[in-house]
Amino acid sequence: MKPANLNIVTHSIINLGLWFWFLVALLPFFWMFLISLRVPVDAFSTPPKLFAPVTFENFRYIWVEDGFWRYALNTTIVTAVTVVVSLTMACLAAYALSRYRGSIGFWLLIAAMVFRAMPHVVLLTAYRPAFFELGIWSRYETLIIVLVAINQPFAIWMLRAFFMNIPEELDEAALVDGCTRWQAFFRVIVPVMWPGIVTAGLFCFLLAYNDFLISSQLMNGDMSTMTAALGSYMGQNQSLARLMHGIAGAVSITIPIIILVFVFQKQIVSGMTAGAVKG
């Protein structure tokens, strides 16, 4: 077989493999979305009904009757503040560590990695008694403090890899042109770093948005986040109707993530490619 024909065959096999993987990965989400638009009788029928009537009653009930919008508001506030604080602190720390050549910077990064590698449940044993004593149990700042602490090491490591790809000559040129160190950072470095910041911000968003363990332990009642609230819809003792409402809630949680990835896909790809060059 000629090399050109061999390349075509190899390319076709790779494409088929990617499409197969995509369909297998998409199937659970597609089936979950399909079930959320049905009544329990049609959703769990045997054999499955692919063309059953469509209804939005599950979504209406969980958002209007059950007040799922309160959990969505809590999630939005906690996630937004967590991402802003995490990125702000991580950008400054990562920039400083990327320019610092001493051994202290290396050990700070190792300490950050060790802290990030700890199971999240270990942190609860230290945070929960302190929050009870301070009287800040089940409040926004309670959850934000813990999520920022968990996000920081990961964000610092990721952003440091991006900053390492920016030559120090760019900083020096900005200083020579009359910029202060802060002006050089915000006016010169940050615009160049934008794809990396978006990538790190998305990962911080996903870590905060999808968190279940910390949210379910530190928040309760109307202060719960969406992922923690879904726990009350799942379980062996729940009715089929209750389970259907939980599935509708799961679909509601998934949709913003899909939209966010599609909106920032170019920045994510360019940012991850830039961060993979040097670290």
Image (cartoon, rainbow, N blue to C red):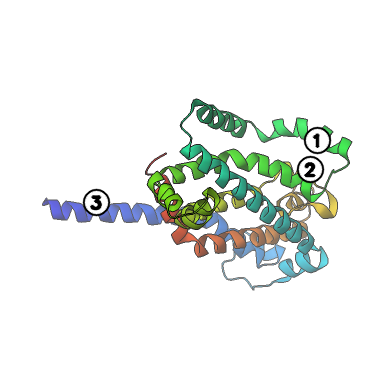
Q: Are marks 2 and 3 in contact (CB under 8 Å)?
A: no
Q: Which amino acid does label 2 sit on?
A: Leu
Residues 173 and 142: in front is 173
| Residue 224 drawn at (x, y percent) | 78, 52
| Residue 21 drawn at (x, y percent) | 42, 52
Q: In this view, does 174 lie above or below 69?
A: above
Q: What element carries label 2?
A: helix
Q: In which quarter of the image is residue 39?
A: bottom right
Mark 3 crowd level (few <14, some 14–19, many ≥20, 10 Å Cα)? few
Residue on which the image places disc 3: 10
- Residue drawn 41% across and 55% down? 270
- Residue drawn 61% across and 49% down? 88
Residue on which the image places disc 1: 128
Residues 157 and 147: in front is 157
- Residue drawn 49% across and 52% down? 184
Any part of residue 160 in sight: yes
Compute the Cα span from label 2 to label 3.
Answer: 52 Å
| Residue 94 drawn at (x, y percent) | 53, 42
Mark 1 crowd level (few <14, some 14–19, many ≥20, 10 Å Cα)? some
Residue on which the image places disc 2: 218
Q: Which amino acid does label 1 sit on?
A: Arg
| Residue 98 drawn at (x, y percent) | 47, 39
Viewer-side label of 3, 1: 1
Any part of residue 44 in sight: no
Compute the Cα span from label 3 to label 1.
Answer: 55 Å
Compute the Cα span from label 1 to label 2.
Answer: 8 Å
Mark 2 crowd level (few <14, some 14–19, many ≥20, 10 Å Cα)? many
Q: Which of marks 3 and 1 is nearer the N terminus?
A: 3
Residues 248 and 135: in front is 135
Q: Is mark 1 on a helix, strand or loop?
A: helix
Viewer-side label of 2, 3: 2
